[in-house]
Amino acid sequence: MKNNLKHNIAFRLAPRLALGHALRHQHKYQRKGAAMLLAIFALLVVGTTTLAFTASRQTTFLSSRNAVNSIRVRELADSGLDLAKAILRSDTTSWRTNHSGGKLLNNYALDGGTVTVSLIDILKRESGASAALCVPISTTTEVEISVTANLDGATWTSVSNMSIPEVVKGQYAIFANKLLWIYGVNNQIGRWNRSPLASEKRRVNIGTQADFASANFSGVWIDSDIQFESEVLPIDAADPRTLKSTWVYYPYNGGTNLWSSSFPINGPGRDKVAAVRMSADESIRMAAAPVPVAAVPAQAGISGGNNITSGTRTLGPFRVGSPSGSFGTNLTTNNCTLLLTAGTYEIYGSWNALNATIRIQGAVKIVVAPKWSIFNWFPSGIDWTNTTVELTAGADLEVNNGYKLTMNRCWIGGYYQCVNEPDPVKAVGDPHMKAWKGLAFQQTACDTITPDEPRYFQPWHVRIYPIKSTLSALFVWNLTDTCLVGSLFLPNNTVRFNGRSEMYGRIAADSVFIDGTSRFRYDHALDDIVGLTEGRAPNRGGDPQEIFPVRPIRWGADKGTGP
């Protein structure tokens, strides 16, 4: 890590620790003689008394100095933690790999003392890895921060845990590069009420790069039945836009379109949002298309064949079909439960699923790459019906899909188990998911009524991307009566939500259509940690520094060195 970066961050964050250049102690001593007899005795011991007085005064001074040093070294440790948090929150410091044996800073000079910052990957340590192997790597998300401060012989150490999702950057709840249409009956756009920051009532931001010109048929259309949040904070009396819970950012050159020559956001519901024109030097642009998943060694096929029609199967990484073949090989999973362990799963064809449950255990990447040939003019990637995808604790799912995607009556979110429910059957599964699948609601110790939303699950753990080589505006991704917790990124394609579909997370696509009674709910924890767009960062309200809370574990003087 470059010293100038650390210095700049430290200069901004380190509190003023100096408590003065000297301690002023004023002692008044008065001596009284009593009698000539005692005077002679005093003369005999005056030397000893003077030495005792000097030693006593020095002891008092040292005790006071140590007390001051204790305060200063504690504040220095706090400054070191602030500095460490700033580095870990930054998306430019590459802290996961830019350290030396876990040491992020080693005897770094700060405010007259030094700080040493060490990092430990908590999940690796919990897995039983040796100390030498517990240093952060590129996938580290849970980190223990140890800050040791030294100042004038005093030492203070603080240990904290911090969660930093390993993601890119981004800002908008919904981004439509060309066209955003929100229509239908009683659609909803707002905050995910179960998300940790929902109580802050931050605004929801929508972005577009559409210039609203009639020639390319681009723009934003908002129907009259759309429901937005009724409350938003903070409110600025001088800015009436802050009364609106949803802001739509559009480019500086946005103007004339098919419906109006004066208002950039159109439709009978346009007054429900605040339209924000960006300045001439600002822009939003779609992030670069994701790079292809790294090639993996040749993997075995699925034992028993590519058609799984019953039972529960635990599977490791597999390959269906061939990346070099001319024809695709489909995977069919019907009426079964699949437990996928960590690794990369490749399907060179289509994945057709019906009444299936897919449980993700660990970091899983799925590549569905349909074949395009003279025998298959309309290749399709994922085609799932009434299928459930559940991620267990600590799991991560990245799906790379080619060409077309179809999800009908599907549910994707976190695996949940009510630990207080004595009935093991009723205890397993998110009640929202069960209701979504059409099962009769069963009251449990954790849920007494049918929940309106899924249990909270960090949406950056589910990412659905297109395969770069298959980007094409010819193919539409359709989600019908489907609930998804996660991220959808389609830089060249259109995504359409139909029926009673729900999304908890964020979307970025060339065009976005929200139809039926669909609803979109945003998790503001996504504001500063992942992104599908680059450029203009919107005003969100709230304090972005609260995104990554720090949980103190230990704080105090090192044994034998503190006062």
Image (cartoon, rainbow, N blue to C red):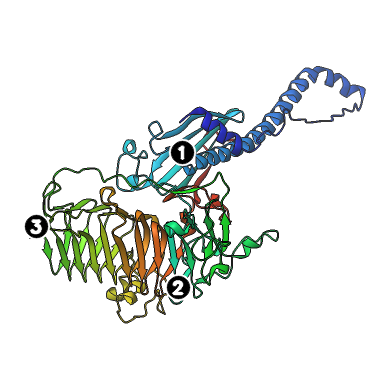
Looking at the picture, does residue 415 appear above or below residue 424?
Answer: above
Looking at the picture, does residue 335 appear above or below residue 365?
Answer: below
Q: Tell me if mark 2 has few (under 14), some (14-19) or many (20+) residues whose alpha carbon lies within 10 angstroms of its own.
A: many
Residue of label 2: 187
Q: Residue at x 37, y 32 (%)?
A: 101
Residue of label 3: 303
The image position of residue 185, as x and y in percent, is 44, 77
Quick one: label 3 or label 2, which is nearer the N terminus? 2
Quick one: label 2 or label 1, which is nearer the N terminus? 1
Q: Tell me if mark 3 has few (under 14), some (14-19) or many (20+) residues whose alpha carbon lies within 10 angstroms of its own.
A: few
In-image side of 229 versus 289 (left or right)? right
The image position of residue 355, as x and y in percent, is 21, 71
Residue of label 1: 92
The image position of residue 462, as x and y in percent, is 34, 57
| Labels 2 and 1 touching (C-beta < 8 A) | no
Q: Which one is in front in this view, the residue at disc 3 or the one at disc 1?
A: 1
In the image, which disc is placed on residue 139? none
Looking at the picture, does residue 188 appear above or below residue 17?
Answer: below
Gap between marks 2 and 1 measured at Cα: 38 Å
| Labels 3 and 1 touching (C-beta < 8 A) | no
